[in-house]
Amino acid sequence: MLLVEKMSSNNKVSSVFYAETYHPIQAGSIDGTDTLPHDNAIYRALLCSNAALYDPFGDPKVIGDPYCTLFVGRLSHLTTEDTLRQAMSQYGKIKNLRLVRHIVTGASRGYAFVEFETEKEMFRAYKDAHHTYIDDSEIIVDYNRQHLMPGWIPRRLGGGLSGKKESGQLRFGGREKPFRAPLRPIPWDELKRLGIPTPPEGRYMSRYQIPSPPRRKRRSSDTEEAREHEKRSEYSHSFGGDRSMYNEYRIHKTHKESSRHSYMHEKRGASSKVLSEERAYINMERDERSSRDLHRHDRWSPSGDDLYRD
């Protein structure tokens, strides 16, 4: 029994979860269950969040599709745009790249945003470029939380994620420092009262699993187009890439479907006609029966003497 409890405790220690929305108090907690800020920066971030002082879409320099944009951090201050572009091009075609620099000195701030042509290329870089080296500096990559994470507050306002232990302002819930599965009782009522997201009890992940970035919500029309494109690709592959045979097959299939629809329409029309004739016949029989009953009553009508005769 003791061994089972010990194994269960060890499994919980290696279990983690990631923040889907940003809350300053939760971000400052190692297990996501704190209900009070533990440093002044969290108070500042909480004030910005409650008073809506930060607008994630207010920076005119931030352009491009957020679902195709990757954040690259911990860059060397010697890394240039050309070096970064060359390193990230191995994961896909780069559409836009912005290395953030100091507004006065022009020196690199150590992070950048890279926009790829497609979401697939962005996800490839998100998965494979994490903890790789550029100019002898180990980088971290993450999705564009500024636009895709609800409630996001940046580091300069007391929020952000990760950080160094020496600063005393560690932030958890991100890819680099996820929340640990709570070992102490979870204050469910207090978390709900403060609007802090609760831990996903029973749905924790392993530390070695890669958290999936947010995906664009597909419209029904996009889904239908993708399904139709998949069918065309499958048919083209079935006919060995012969376009003429594929076109003949499509024409034959379309004609067959239209013939089937016409047959079903005629069948429904015939059924409706038979049903109408049956109803008319039934109505005619009912009218004749009513007429016969009426004539029978008209042939004999009792007099007053007949009604009171013994």
Image (spheres, grey):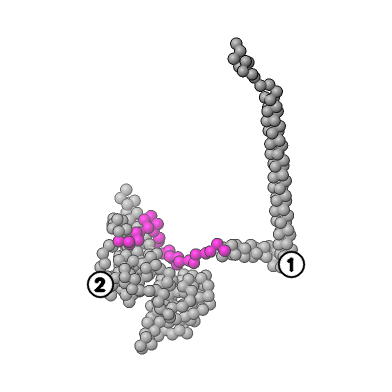
Where does label 1 land, which residue?
244
Calculate the distance from the C-alpha at mark 2 to the C-alpha at mark 1: 71 Å
The residues colored magenta run: 194-221
Q: Residue at 43% of width from left, 65% of height from top?
A: 211
Q: Amino acid at mark 2?
A: Asn
How dense is the environment of label 2, judged by Cα within 10 Å: few (below 14), some, or many (20 and up)? few
The quadrant of the image that shows the C terminus is: top right
Asked whether 199 falls inside the magenta stretch, the response is: yes
For image coordinates 37% across by 68% down, the residue present is 151
Find the residue positioned furthest to the top: 310
Compared with 9, 242 (above or below) is below
Residue type at mark 1: give it: Ser
Q: Secondary structure at mark 1?
A: helix
* Mark drawn on residue 231: none
> Mark 1: few, some, or many residues within 10 Å (few <14, many ≥20)?
few
- Helix, strand or loop at label 2? It is helix
Q: Is residue 257 visible?
A: yes
